[in-house]
Each structure stands twice: as structure tokens, then as C-alpha cells.
Amino acid sequence: MRDVLVVDAVRTPTGVRNGSLSGLRPDENLASALNHLVSERLRIDPASVEDLVCGCVTQIGEQALNIARNALLASGLPASIAGVTVNRQEGSGQAAMAFAAQAIAAGEMDVAIACGVESMSRQPMGSDGFGDHVAHLGTGISPRLCDSFGDLYSQGMAAERLASSWGFSREELDGYALRSHERASAAIACGFYDNEIVPAEVTAAGGRTMLLRHDEGVRSDLTLQELSTLAPAFKPGGVITNGNSGQAADGAAAVFLAAAERCSELGLAPKARYVCTAVSGEDPSLAPGGHISATRRALRKAGLRMEDIDLFEVNESFAAVPMAWMRELEPPRPESVNAWGGAVANGNPLGASGVKLACTLISGLAEKGGRYGLLATCTGMGMGIATILERTQ
């Protein structure tokens, strides 16, 4: 198997639902990130790219009909580049990165782009499987599955089960949420995200155009008192609120992957080496823990221990997700988990989330001088995915 290198990674800022990015089609938003990555950041012949693998969850409307290919053509990159769209729910972007890396490692291609995109403003979560507009086609989940596993689609109720299983109180969850905003605010203030974010041109109030340079949902003025006033979002008397959940968001992200020998031929200086990815599936009726079992599998594949990992990005689809992960796996340096905030503060644009967090992991390893980083995501339907990267520069 050949070494697969991550040459560069970029992302758009995330926009809150119905916020600044809601006026952009998702394929056009991704197109701008792709064009910036290839034509401005790397400045290489785009014809060297063989495939584009894109994660996207709600594949309906503007995100249907293979958005990977549509965004590629909209970007102005050569039509000779193929494109495919994959869906592993919140782990879709991460899966896209794994699929592209595996093809390169196997020698089936030399250069590929992995990416992810989601506009939760324009294509609401679940609209591909539920609602009056698709009722004549049947629902996205078979009644037989509901009989066996219960309410499979409600991620909020899954988060309630997770919080209950690990005994997290409302106060603990809100405290974690506040820290996510504090860390993200500090990261913005010190310019940590500047190198990975491609500013997006958006239309502001009054019709004027402006550049959105940072994740729109981050709150530097948030308080515990404000969080405590929010009502439970999914269950009467529950502990999961909109404040301690990952924010629905719009965004896109992309990473450029190449075989080691092809990097040398193209004169590219890679930022990381792709080590491995592991996936896991569990009973979806139980408290979700796929991100925990996937992390254990990835460490075993890589021959590493938790102590060997310098930085962790655990997707904050809900505050309870990284909290359970830390409780179970006991990272030796808890401050190395989501050190620059997470989706509770800067958004969870579903299909783009995994690639977005890969951008932050790569930036973080460079900032800290760390060697290994691990990215873990808990997804719907009882799944999890974990990826390990190694800094090369």
C-alpha cells in the first residue's frame, strides 16, 4: 500500500441556519472552495486531479443529482475530473476522505480531492426522507425498522439517551457548551482559523456585499445564565437544548490528497499523512457510542495508544457526544480535545463536518507541533467513524 499525503485543506466559514450563507446554493459554495484550493492555494494543473469524492447528507433539491459533479463543473475545474457523492450521515465528509485515500493507497489513482458540503438552510435535515413533498414515495425508514429499534431518526432523543447513560446533568452539558464558544472565540481572536478559511462573499442587509471571514454562530458574549434559560428541545424535562447541541449550519470544505511520489513530481509540500480510518456500527436503539468504538478500532489499526495522539477533534453534534467519548476513553490531556471549540459553537454542516474538522486538526497539529491527530464522529443510525492523521511538516 502506498503512502497517502494530505497536501492542503480549506473550508468556507460556517453560516448559521437562515444566516449569511443561506443565499448561496450549496454546489456554488463548494465550487468556490474547490477553485480556491486548486487554482489559488496550490496553483497546479487541475487536470492532475482524477476524482472528486464528496460527502453530503440531505441529497435532495440543490444537493441532489450528484452534487460532487455539479460543484466540480460549476467551479471551472476540468470536466475530465470525475465526481461521486457519498452519504454516511454526519460522517459523510470523513468517509469521502477515507474513500479517496483508499483509492490512492491501492494504486487506482494518484491524485484526488475529498470534500463535503451541506446547506441546512436550503435543504433541511430529513427533507430527503420525510415530509409531504416525498410522502407519495414512502418514508425514509421502514416501519419494520421502527418496530425493531424504535425512533431511529431523532438525533435529539439519541443524545438524551447518551446523556442519561453517562449521567450528564443539564449543568454539565451547558458548561461544556459555554467552553466550546469560549475556545472558538479565542481561536478567532488569535487568527487560528485564518489559514484554513476561504472568506465567502455574501449579501448583507441593504443589499450590500461583504466577506464572511469567520464562523457565524460563535458567541463571545454567551453566559451560563443564558444557556440555562433554554427549554429542552426534544423531551419534556430533558437535558438537551439548542444551546448544548451542534448548530445547524451551512458550509463546505475540501482536502487535496495525493500519493507520496506524485507529490514529489508536482513539487507539492504535504501537511499530513493519512494513517487510517475505522468505522463502527452499533444497535441504534441504544445510547450512541459509535464514535467510541470507531476510535478504539482506528487506534488498533494504527498500532497507537491514546497517549500517542497529540490532538483530538470529536464532532460536537451534541455536547454529550465528546463528553461521553472523554469519559469512556480518558484522554491523558483533556485540553487536547476540541481545543479550538467545536460544532456547538461554530456549526455542524452535516456532510461537510468531517472535512471541516480535518482542516482544524491539520491546523492544530501545525500550531502545536504535534505528530498525530485523531478525528471521531458519531453519526445517526448507530454508526461511528474515526480517522488518524500524522503531521509531515
Image (cartoon, helix red, strand yellow):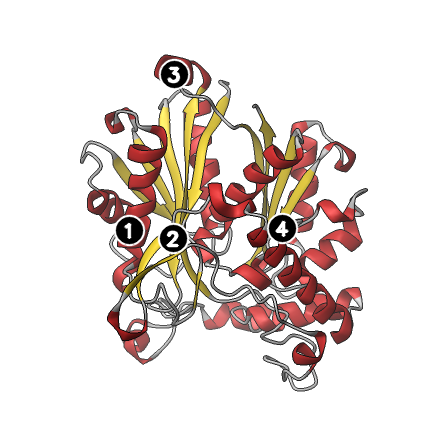
Label 1 or label 3, whichever comes before in sequence order: 1
Label 4 or label 3, whichever comes before in sequence order: 3
Label 4 is placed on what type of residue?
A: Trp
- Who is closer to the viewer here, 147 or 84? 84
Which SS class for mark 4? loop
Residue 328 visible to an observer of this rendering: yes
Compared across the picture, whether 144 is left or right of 163 comes to left
Q: Which residue is disc 2 drawn over?
A: 117
Answer yes or no: do the residues labelled 1 and 3 have beta carbons within 8 Å? no
Gap in Å between the C-alphas at discs 1 and 2? Answer: 9 Å
Q: Which residue is disc 3 drawn over?
A: 267
Label 1 or label 2, whichever comes before in sequence order: 1
Q: Which residue is disc 1 drawn over?
A: 67
Label 3 is placed on what type of residue?
A: Gly
Label 3 or label 2, whichever comes before in sequence order: 2
Answer yes or no: do the residues labelled 4 and 2 have beta carbons within 8 Å? no
Gap in Å between the C-alphas at discs 1 and 4? Answer: 30 Å
Of tags 1 and 3, the one toward the viewer is: 3
Horizontal and vertical percent position of residue 5 = 48, 25
The C terminus lies in quadrant: top right
Horizontal and vertical percent position of residue 127 = 37, 70
Residue at the image point whose x is 62% and y is 36% from the top: 367
Label 2 is placed on what type of residue?
A: Val
Label 4 or label 2, whichever comes before in sequence order: 2
